């Protein structure tokens, strides 16, 4: 017997006592008081986790989902349950709490053959570390002794560490770096090309000895700039993703005091975009307060003010098969308010967003499985949900420990 609590911004179901039964929670929602252009559901996959911050897959045909926990572990959900043994446990190396911790994992595009994976964490001194590990003889265990540090970046403050790792369609590893923290980027890291902070980095992990610089990185011939830099002017690109259909890069950048934003870099870009921080916050001047854009800055495609939240969590553009009505929708959310938006691009290239759900969840991350289905992580309850449209194929029926079973069904409809 256990007690399961399901809550939204307006509704709290509590003391639902289940005698040995599994519980599938599905949250339905619409935008405002009228129906949105499309409807989504959140299907509970697993709960009871300790501070999940990233969800991904290995691309090896196993259909496993890898869940990163802030404290320093990576778990495996095999479709039925979360395995008891962590895939990787580096808690002894990680300073966690607040914005520090083990922040993401990315699997090499050839992981199925080479078994290499990469993690981004803050070490015991609070600095960012990008390290490579290898899978062990057990496919459900990484070898903790295989660690090789590729890159270490000093962090002057405890916040704005970025933390997302993603392999692009070009096979290179992209690393999101925050501006180093404090408030207002006091050292102007994001606009300083000799500094890795406040940037999107791009490296070739197949280079020697640890990595090399792609020959077409935009600042490779600049004697002042760090060659790893792919784009600049970012405050805290906590979560970014590639559209698996087009190769476009979506960067959600956490704002300062007024605006949250989403930037898009098209797949044909040669890099070097300046996304504006600290000159601009969203599409508004920040420092200086006027005449901040000479015309060389790349403005966001989407933004919202702090009446709707305070910290954006970037997601993915839906390219799955179970919910064809969601094809091409870019999902993102706000960590503070729990609101979820879906954005679409019209024929003129203009992006428009609709609020789809007001959940009350603390959404730290979105992720994809191998088929392109999208998941999200709720930090507060330690839960992972799968997003689906309506109608859609049914989600797995799982309990709070991820085990299969029959049992109750709780449906929450938000007005």
Image: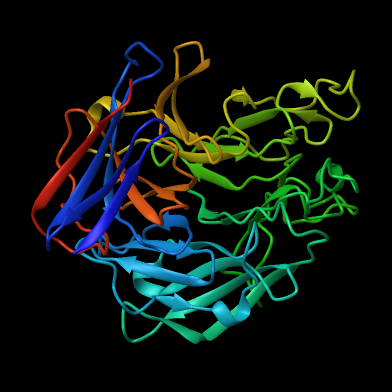
* Front residue of 187 and 61: 187
Figure check: 274 above or below 373: above
Relative horizontal placement of residue 346, taking residue 309 as reference (left or right): left
Q: Position of residue 114 (x, y in %)?
A: 41, 75
Quarter of the image containing the N terminus? bottom left
Q: Position of residue 150 (x, y in %)?
A: 65, 72
Relative horizontal placement of residue 264, taking residue 339 as reference (left or right): right
Q: Position of residue 262 (x, y in %)?
A: 59, 31
Quarter of the image containing the C terminus? top left
Residue 149 quadrant: bottom right
Residue 400 quadrant: bottom left
Q: Residue furthest left?
A: 406
Any part of residue 312 in sight? yes
Figure check: 106 above or below 13: below
Q: How many marks?
A: 0
Residue at the image position 54 percent from the left and 69 percent from the top: 71
Relative horizontal placement of residue 126, taking residue 86 as reference (left or right): right
Display colour scheme? rainbow
Residue at the image position 88 percent from the left and 30 percent from the top: 287
Figure check: 349 above or below 77: above
Residue at the image position 68 percent from the left and 73 percent from the top: 123
Figure check: 133 above or below 82: below
Relative horizontal placement of residue 200, taking residue 74 as reference (left or right): right
* Front residue of 92 and 324: 92
Residue 303 quadrant: top right
Q: Residue furthest front?
A: 15
Any part of residue 373 in sight? no
Q: Position of residue 155 (x, y in %)?
A: 78, 62
């Amino acid at each position: 017997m256990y007690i399961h609590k399901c809550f939204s911004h307006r509704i709290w179901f509590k003391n639902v006592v289940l005698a040995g039964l599994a519980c599938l929670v599905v949250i339905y929602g619409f935008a405002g008081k009228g129906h949105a252009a499309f409807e989504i559901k959140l299907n509970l996959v697993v709960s009871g986790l300790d501070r999940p911050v990233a969800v991904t897959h290995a691309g090896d045909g196993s259909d496993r989902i890898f869940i990163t926990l802030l404290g320093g572990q990576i778990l495996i959900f095999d479709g039925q349950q979360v395995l008891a043994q962590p895939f990787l446990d580096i808690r002894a190396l990680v300073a966690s709490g607040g914005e520090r911790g083990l922040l993401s994992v990315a699997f090499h595009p050839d992981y199925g053959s080479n078994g290499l994976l990469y993690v981004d964490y803050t070490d015991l001194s609070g600095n960012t570390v990008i390290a490579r590990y290898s899978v062990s003889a057990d496919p459900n265990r990484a070898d903790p002794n295989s660690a090789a540090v590729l890159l270490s970046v000093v962090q002057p403050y405890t916040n704005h560490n970025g933390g997302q790792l993603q392999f692009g369609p070009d096979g290179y590893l992209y690393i999101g770096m925050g501006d180093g923290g404090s408030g207002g980027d006091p050292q102007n890291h994001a606009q300083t090309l000799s500094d890795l902070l406040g940037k999107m980095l791009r490296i070739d992990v197949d280079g020697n000895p640890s990595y090399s610089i792609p020959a077409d990185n935009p600042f490779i011939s600049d004697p002042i700039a760090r060659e790893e830099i792919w784009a600049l002017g970012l405050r805290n690109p906590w979560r970014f993703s590639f559209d698996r259909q087009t190769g476009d890069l979506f960067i959600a950048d956490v704002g300062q005091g007024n605006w949250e934003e989403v930037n898009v870099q098209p797949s044909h870009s040669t890099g070097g975009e300046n996304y504006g921080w600290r000159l601009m916050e969203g599409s508004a001047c920040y420092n200086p307060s006027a005449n901040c854009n000479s015309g060389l800055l790349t403005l966001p495609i989407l933004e919202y003010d702090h009446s709707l939240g305070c910290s954006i969590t970037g997601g993915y553009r839906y390219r799955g098969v179970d919910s064809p009505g969601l094809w091409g929708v870019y999902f993102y959310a706000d960590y503070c308010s729990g609101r979820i938006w879906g954005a679409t691009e019209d024929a003129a290239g203009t992006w428009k967003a609709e609020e789809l759900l007001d959940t009350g969840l603390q959404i730290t991350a979105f992720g994809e499985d191998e088929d392109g289905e999208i998941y999200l992580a709720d930090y507060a309850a330690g839960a992972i949900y799968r997003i689906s449209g309506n109608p859609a194929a049914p989600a797995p029926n799982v309990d709070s420990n991820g085990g299969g079973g029959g049992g109750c069904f709780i449906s929450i409809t938000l007005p």
